[in-house]
Image (cartoon, rainbow, N blue to C red):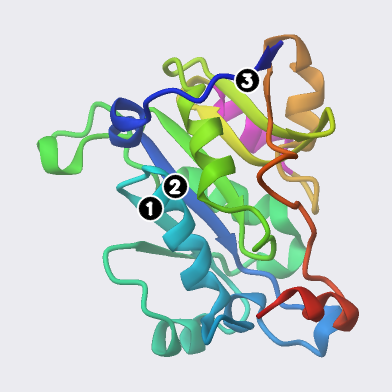
Amino acid sequence: MTHTEHGSTSDAGDQVFGLVLAAGGGRRLGGRPKALLEHRGRPLVEHVVRTLRSAGCTRVHVVLGAGADAVREQARLDGCVLVDNPDWAQGMGTSLRAGLASLPRPASPAGAAAAGARGALVLLVDQPGIGPQAVARVLAAYEGESSLVSAAYDGERGHPVLLGSRHWTGVAAAATGDRGARAYLSAHRGALTLVECGDVARPFDIDTPDDLAHLE
């Protein structure tokens, strides 16, 4: 299933929470936490949070792991819910599980100000080439708690990924090692909406010293 229209994200932004996976330790970068790599003069994690907010996500959870205390001290993450993942070294799957578990369910009794999440829009901290345009396209494809949406680049699935709340239990069960939601999405490709974003984003990762050239 392919989606190409870029519609309104106002309603979706109230129901879909942004989820930043920012726990990586940057093993091939000398052990520097990826969240604190400098991009445009500020920690990379701030850039990713701004991207989600600019695209329409009013509420953002950030999963921290490597250098969590330093990230709290150095990055301006006001208004974000910060989630600690003590098992971050076991792979991205643990961060995805921790992030999904942190989201308030729709039946939350805390009132409208803390209304529950019906979807999670997942973005990785080390992909600064994915900006608000791509994220907004994926968010615009949200159609309720059964939504399963992924950005695509020349037809190949990538990030961000939007997971409707009905999928969270299955995603968490399948999220092992560094695979994140990959296995679940592969098993449910018939229900997956692909949103082409290759014209507005570049899905490179910041993994090696050579990749640092992508940062500004």
Q: Main secondary structure of the magenta part?
A: helix
Instruction: Mark yes or no: residue 112 visible.
Output: yes
Cα separation, mark 2 vs mark 3, equals 21 Å
Q: Residue furthest front?
A: 199
Where on the picture, by quarter, is residue 103? top left
Where on the picture, by quarter, is residue 189? top right
Seen in the picture, residue 152 relative to 95 is either above or below; the reply is: above
Residue position for label 2: 18
Seen in the picture, residue 130 relative to 128 is either above or below; the reply is: above
Residue kind at label 2, given as amino acid type: Gly
Q: Which circle, 3 or 1, is nearer the viewer? A: 3
Query: Toward the viewer: 68 or 18?
Result: 18
Query: Residue at 79% of width from left, 62% of height from top?
Result: 205
Cα separation, mark 1 vs mark 2, equals 8 Å
Instruction: Identify the mark at residue 53; answer none if there is no mark.
Output: 1
Residue stretch rendered in magenta on the structure: 167-175
Between discs 1 and 2, the one toward the N terminus: 2
Residue position for label 3: 4
Instruction: Decide if residue 3 is on the left or right side of residue 31.
Output: left
Q: Position of residue 45 (x, y in %)?
A: 53, 71
Query: Toward the viewer: 149 or 67?
Result: 149
Instruction: Decide if residue 157 is on the left or right side of residue 139.
Output: right
Marks 1 and 2: CB-CB under 8 Å? Answer: yes
Cα separation, mark 3 vs mark 1, equals 21 Å
Query: Residue at 21% of width from left, 36% of height from top?
Result: 115
